[in-house]
Amino acid sequence: MKTSFRTFLLGGLVLAGVSLAPSKLHVTADDVALYGYSAESSRTERQWEEKMRAIPDPKNLRAYMERLTARPHNVGSPYDKDNAEWLLAKFQEFGLDVHIETFSVLYPTPKERLVELVDGGPHFTAKMQEPPVPEDPTSSQTAEQLPTYNAYSIDGDVTAPLVYVNYGMPEDYEVLERRGISVKGAIVIARYGRTWRGIKPLMGAEHGAVGCIIYSDPHDDGYSGGEVFPKGPWRPKDGVQRGSVQDSAVFMGDPLTPGIGATADAKRVPLKDAQSLTKIPVLPISYADAEPLLAAIGGPVAPRDWRGGLPITYRLGPDPAKVHLKVYSNWDMKPLYDVIAKIPGSTHPDEWVIRGNHHDAWVNGAEDPISGMVTVLEEARSMGELLKQGWKPKRTLIYCAWDGEEPGLLGSTEWVETHVDELRKHAVIYINSDSNSRGYLALEGSHTLEHFINDVARDIQDPETKLSVWKRAQLKGIADAATADERREFLERHDIRLDMLGGGSDHAPFINFAGIASLGIGYGGEDHGGIYHSIYDDFYWYTHFSDYDFVYGRALCQTGGTAMMRMANADLLPFQFADFADDVKMYVREVEKFAGQQRDEIQERNQKISEGLYEATSDPRETWMAPKKEELPPHLNFAPLDNAVEDLTRSAGEYQKALEKISANGGAVLANASLQDVNELLIQSERKLTTPEGLPGRFWYKHQLYAPGAYTGYSAKAIPAVRENLEQKKWKEAEQAAARVAQVLENESALINSATAKLSALGK
Ligand SMILES: [Zn+2]
C-alpha cells in the first residue's frame, strides 16, 4: 500500500555558499575491509557480492511481472492463490526450501454502494465505475475487478449535508472551527493525500460527522500533473483509489485477532466488538463523481490552499448540498497465502536475515506491489545461482512474499504475531520493499543500520547516471535541502541519515511489534502518475510510464541482494551505534524544541486574543471565530532524556573504539574468535528499544523510538510517547513518557557496554 515517504522536490542544485569539494567519498577498494569483516573474509565477500550483482536480468523481471499481473489478484481471489502457488514453484525451482503458510482473516468486500446528491443541485448518482481502456488489455477484466471501496468501513446508510474538509487532517478542522463550521451530523468530503486515508474518516467521526467520502482531486494526482491515462501516466477522471481505512492507531493486522496470529484455531473477537473498523461509513470516488457534489456545496469560499484542480469554486458548506451515502459489505473470512522460502545458514542457522514484499494487490497491481515483488524473486534466483557455484551463507536467509498487505498488512502481521517468540530470538534484520520505479534510493529504517545500508548504497551503480546510488542520493539531498545546515550535513556527514519507517508497509510488524531492526528499500522520485490502487495500475501502464526497461528493478535486486549477503556473512554483525546515537540526539533535540515552540505559540496567541487582534482583522461580513485562550504549559523536565543521550553517545564511541582495535592488522581477531556472544547481544539491540506494554493506549506499537503517528498514519513520529502527549497537550504525561524513554535508552547503553566489554576481552 506504500506511497512515497520521502518527497522528492523538483528543483536545481542549490549550492549557495557551499562548495561540493569537501565531500567525503567512500573508498570501495578491496583493501578496505567491510564493516564487521576481517580483511580476508571481506575480500571473499566482495567477490561473491560482485558475482551476485551480475546475475539479475531485466528480462526476467518483465516476464515475472507479466505473469503476476495477468489478472486481478486481491485477497480471496482465485488469482491471488494462483500467484502464491506460482511463486512457490519459482522459489523451489531456484533451489530454496519453500512452503505456503495460511491464515484466515476478516476481509470485507462491497455488496452495496451508493453516493447520490439529493439536494442542492440536479439529482446525481455517482458512477463509481472505472471504464476499460481499449489499448490496455487487462483494464477490461471487469468481472474479476474488485469494485471501488474502502475496506473496513462499517456498514451504513446516511443522508446529511455535505462539508468540504480539505485533506481531513487535524489542522483542517481547526480552520473549519475558526470559520464557525461544524461537521456534526454532516457527511464530510475529503480529498486523498497528505495523510493516510484511514485518518480522514477517523477525524470526521471524532468531530461528529456521520459519513465520509474520499475523492482523488485532479490537483493531487490528475491532470494538474500532466496527461491522464492512457495518453499519460496521471489519473483519468473516473479513476478511483481503493484502499483500507482500518483504524490502525492501536494495532495492525486482522481486526479479529489483535496481537495474535490468525491461525485456524485462534481465539477471535466477535465482529461486533472489532475495534479497528471505522466509526462511520466511508466510500472513495473519482473526480468526475466528486465534481457535481462539490459544486453543490454552499457556504464560505474555501481558503486558497484548500482549492483543488476542478473548474469550480470550492466552498466549505454545509448548505445546500445534501448527500445520501450507503455502503454494505460482505463480512467474510478469507484465506491468506504467505510464501516463505529459506536458504539455511551454514554456520549460524539460528540467525535469520529476512527479506519481503507483498504479492496481493487491489486489482492487477503492477507498480504496487509487483514491481517490488519481482525484484525479491529475482534476488532469490540470484542466491540460488550462487549456491550452485558453491557459495554458502553463514546465516539463514528467508525470502517472504506476503499476502493481504493492502487491507492492513495482514499477511506479514499474522506471520510475525504467530512466530513472535522465535523471531525475537533469531531475527537479525528485516528488509522490506513494496513497489519500485525510477530515480533515487529511499534510505529509511532503523538507525542502528544506518552505516550498514549507506555502505551497501555506495556499491550499487545508478542505471541512469552511472554514479553510485549513494552519491546520487547525496546530491539529491543537497539539491533539496531546505536550510544551509541541512545542506552542510549532506556534504559533511559520512552517512546519509535514514528516514524513519512509518506505517505504510510490511516492515511495521517487524519493527513496531517485534522490535526487529528493519530497512525499507526501493527506487523512486522520477516517475509520477495517478493509477495508485486503480484498475489502471497494470502491466500496460508500468511498461509505458515507469521503469519499462526494468533497469531500476535490477538495481533493487542488487541493493537487496548485497544487503542480504553482507548481513548474512559478516563476522561481527554490522550494527553501528555512532550514527544511531547521533540520530537519537537529533530526535531528542527536536522533541524538546517542539515543546518550547508549543509554549511560545500558546503565549503569542493568548496575547493576540487579549489585544483583540482576531476581531479587528476578520472581515465583519463573514463569520470568524477567534481562537480561545489556552493555559500556558509548564516548563517540562527533559533532563533524563538528555542524560540518556549522553550515555548513549559515550557507549557508542567506546564500542567503536573496541571494534577498531580488534579490526587492526587485518582483523585476525574478527576472523578467528567466536563472536557468538557479541552477535547475540547485537541481535537484541533493537529489541531493547521496545517495552512489553508498548506506547500509551497503543499496545501493539512496542518500539519506543519510532511509530506511525496516531493521527498521521503513514509518516512516523520519533519518540512517539513524548511527541504525541505534547501534541495532545498532556504535559504531565509527556514528562513521564520522557523518563520512561530515557530508561529504555539507558538499557540500550548498557547492552552496548556489555558488547564492548566482550569485544575488548577478545582483543586481549
Ligand atoms: Zn503495496
Image: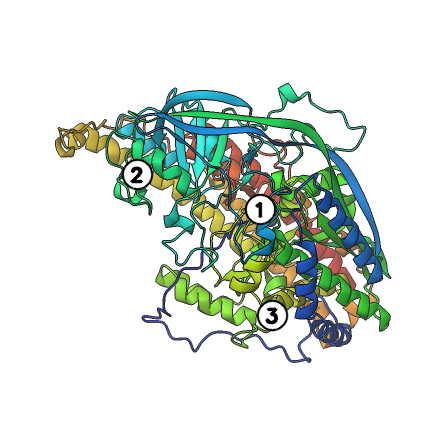
* Amino acid carrying mark 2 in the image: Asp
Q: Residues within 10 Å of mark 2 (few under 14, many from 20)?
A: some
Looking at the image, is mark 3 or mark 2 earlier in the sequence? 3
Q: Which residue is drawn at 41% across and 58% down?
A: 227
Q: Name the residue under label 3.
A: 551
Quadrant position of residue 243: top right
Looking at the rendered image, the quarter that the C terminus falls into is bottom right
Looking at the image, is mark 3 or mark 1 earlier in the sequence? 1
Q: In the visual, does 669 lie left or right of 627? A: right
Contact check, label 3 and label 2, Cβ < 8 Å: no
Q: How crowded is mark 1: few (under 14 residues within 10 Å), some or many (20 or more)?
A: many
Q: Can residue 760 be seen in this view?
A: no
- Residue 1 is tagged as 1
- Percent across and percent down for residue 265 are 81, 28
- Percent across and percent down for residue 384 are 81, 65
Quadrant position of residue 49: bottom right
SS at mark 2 in the image: helix
Q: Residue furthest front?
A: 134
Q: Does the residue labelled 3 lie within 8 Å of ligand 1?
A: no
Q: Which of marks 3 and 2 is in front?
A: 3
* Amino acid carrying mark 1 in the image: Met
Q: Name the residue under label 2.
A: 600
- Relative vertical location of residue 227 with respect to residue 591 in this rendering, above or below: below
